[in-house]
Image: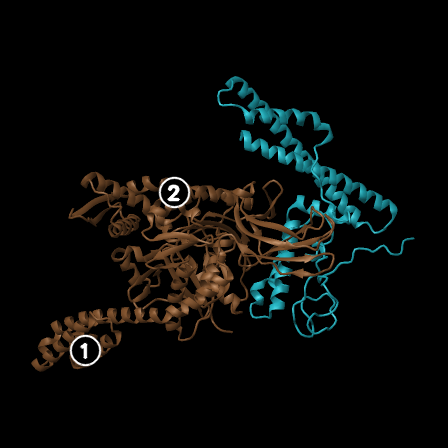
Amino acid sequence: MARIVGIDLGTTNSLIAYMDGDAPRVITGRHGRALVPSVVAMTDNGLIVGDPAKEHLVRNPERTVYSVKRFMGKSLEDVAEELTYFPYKLHEQGGVIRIQIGEKTYSPPQISAMILKELKLRAEEHLGEEIKKVVITVPAYFNDSQRQATKDAGTIAGLDVLRIINEPTAASLAYGLQKRTQGIIAVYDLGGGTFDISILKLKNGIFEVLATNGNTHLGGDDFDRKVANLLLKEIRSRYNLDVEPYLDTMQVVRLEAERAKIRLSEERKTPAVIELPAGKGEFRFELTRDQLEALTRDLVEQTIGPCRLALKDAGLQPPEIDEVVLVGGSTRMPLVRQRVQELFGKVPHSELNPDEVVALGAAVQADILSGGTQNMLLLDVTPLSLGIETMGGVMSPLIRRNTTIPASAKEMFTTYADGQTSVDIHVLQGERELAKDNRSLARFQLKVPPLPAGVPRVEVMFLIDANGILNVSAKDVRTGQTQSIEVKPSSGLTDEEVERMISESFKFAAEDLKARQLIEAHTEAEAILKATEKALGLGGHLIGADEIASIKASLAALKAARVTEDHRAIRARIADVEKATHHLAEVLMDSALKEALQNKKLSELP
Amino acid sequence: MDQTQKTPTKRTELQMARSMCWHCQSEIHGEYFCVQCVKVQPVSKELDYFTCLGLPRLLNIDTDVLETKFYELSRVFHPDFFQNKTETEQAISLGNSALLNTAYRTLKDPIRRAEYLVQLEAGSAKDIRTSPPADLFEEILALQEDLQEFRSAAPGQDPGHMEDLRARLKTDREALERRQQDMESRLLELFTKWDSLQGRAEQDDQLRTEKTAVLTQMRALLSNRTYLRNIVNDLVETIG
């Protein structure tokens, strides 16, 4: 069985992890960082992802996409309120959001696929093997469209998504594995863009989700926005300057707001510094934790309602929760911890890195699927009720929220007119009474034989699989014949669109590779220039003048090559510098060794 | 003498859909996996939830035993363990798991359990309609009127009158809640009665008549209880 890896595809950051023996491990990149910022930039040289793309947020705001997870499986109408906050342009096509970058448009799954590919590459470099099969996590409160969009993203990235699992439950797997906990736990997961609460029962390796609730549009992004708005207001009043038209400065403000917020988890006050446009100079502002808490208290409060609902659905009172586990970067905020502690009446656990625990859990689930871990089993639930529209525009639930998945429900359909040949079925998800207030998942036409009204009997099976994704099948009860149903998702990509995006992604792959190689060459050139100049400073006196001259010449050549876009030329010059400095490196090593020995007393030597 | 009467047989294994393995056609005697080819077998769709979870058709259930059995069968059928198997096996695992989950959810909750049993024993699974308790008919009519008036009251309505209305609704709510609890304890009595009837060795007309009577009483109680619960929910939503 080929290796299966686990991916946390986050709003702000993404990670990839695998099972190393019997412990899950996140894969770090070249610079030792496990987090890959979920940012994609379209440069003139192609596409870049992660840390280097983050730099383009300010340089190239209209062509740099961040927080794309907020748009997964959504229509433009769903996100209308927050559109003004994003520097890139959005429109809609076939019920799916498209992100306009230059001449081209991309669907959110396509952008997510770019992030997934980056993670895939990282894992392949680390593990030295091709990665095809993955488990991807999603917020527990993601609906069918959002889950399907995530699966599509995997398919577009050329991955076989074996399982979509919920982030809080993934976290519980990692937590349970490490702590060997038994009993009832609550996982409070406040990430960059989403909030989930899940209540689980852990018993002899079974992780049974009792209830889940949340808000897929509430997270760190919203906290940043509150701080950013305060800064913008302050700039306006102090300088009479509207920053909104300056997309690059808007990004500077957003990023500075995020940094200040993060610092305020440790400190009581922190400066925010912003270089203003239009020659207005530098804006300095001191933000206090009290101010931050006053700004964001209502957001934290919005997480409490879902927690209460989840408790109610699980039939539990707060004291019956044995342990509370915090997940997601936003749970580092003292105010969040304090509120969670107040609600559950116990100190929440935060020993596991809240940024990594979800990816670690995904790796555990991947290992279960590959047959490695056998004693653990996750029994998850569907977060939202599934139903169909019935007479008078009413939602008639078939599978209630918090039902353990896989879950199925059967419904019998017949005709109301003689000779009627089809029945329209509208599938909904949500908790509201009226069909129109719920999310429309899909519509399809059931084919029925032309018979007198009421005679045909077609049984439709609605099945929510272990991914929380709906499958529909139908059977004519009279003939026993099954019929395949083409379900048109209300806001999702059709199969043909996904196919097209896969082929496009291969077409762009060559271009993207070029961009990646160039970035890597640039990064390496920077590093070697810095290191060589330092080495010359330290050991210049230890080598001859000729050697110094040849090293300096090789450095000059590299500096000249660095500004080009030819990664091969840059690589060649890097090799030249390495050759020229080979002796210097040896000399420095020797002297360092001597120095180390000199600093020791004789008695300390072996 | 009725020779065809069956005594409830105790089975440790589930009844499977076919007596023949779908894959290698070997004979199957209720095993989850074919003895010959080790392929998972589909659970019969006609299987009742009690049998599915290896329990006798009783109403007082040890929920710990139920949970243990559910976990045990989840470990057998969950799709997680069929990832490397063929598509057919994956589909069987999915179907079996979905059925198992429904069975567990139904039996875990005493009300759902009772409703299920009443329908099961009735043969052609007739729905339990919700209906008001006959003796409360007048009160409920009056209450519905009050509720309607309270809901449609304009903001400027006489506050004194509105307070009276609210107080009346609150009293009604408390009375109905007490009645609901009363019904639930009567249901529990019937649970015990049913279980003792199920335990009787002799299978005669007398027993059948008694069983039918218990089922009829339960059906009426369940239907009234659901009706009351809906009204109480309405009241809670309206007056808090």
**Could you tell me which residue is drawn at 56 percent across and 67 percent down?**
B83
Which chain does tag 1 point to?
Answer: A
- The amino acid at mark 1 is Val
Query: Relative to residue A387, is residue B18 drawn left or right?
Result: right
Q: Is residue A48 visible?
A: yes
Query: Relative to residue B198, is residue A180 drawn left or right?
Result: left
Tag 1 residue: A577
Q: Are marks 2 and 1 on the same chain?
A: yes
State the separation of the CA atoms marked 2 and 1. Answer: 54 Å
Query: What mark, if any, has residue A299 been given in the picture?
Result: 2
Q: Position of residue A408 (x, y in %)?
A: 62, 54
Tell me the cyan chain. B
Tell me the brown chain. A
Say if mark 2 contacts mark 1, CB within 8 Å.
no
Nearer to us in this view, B104 or A561: A561
Q: Where is residue B73 in the image (x, y as percent from the top left)?
A: 63, 60
**Could you tell me which residue is drawn at 73 percent across and 28 percent down?**
B135
When asked about the image quadrant of residue B26, the answer is bottom right
When asked about the image quadrant of residue B55, the answer is bottom right
Nearer to us in this view, A81 or B90: A81
Q: Which of marks 2 and 1 is nearer the N terminus?
A: 2
Task: Name the element at disc 2.
Answer: helix
Q: Where is residue A429 in the image (x, y as percent from the top left)?
A: 54, 48
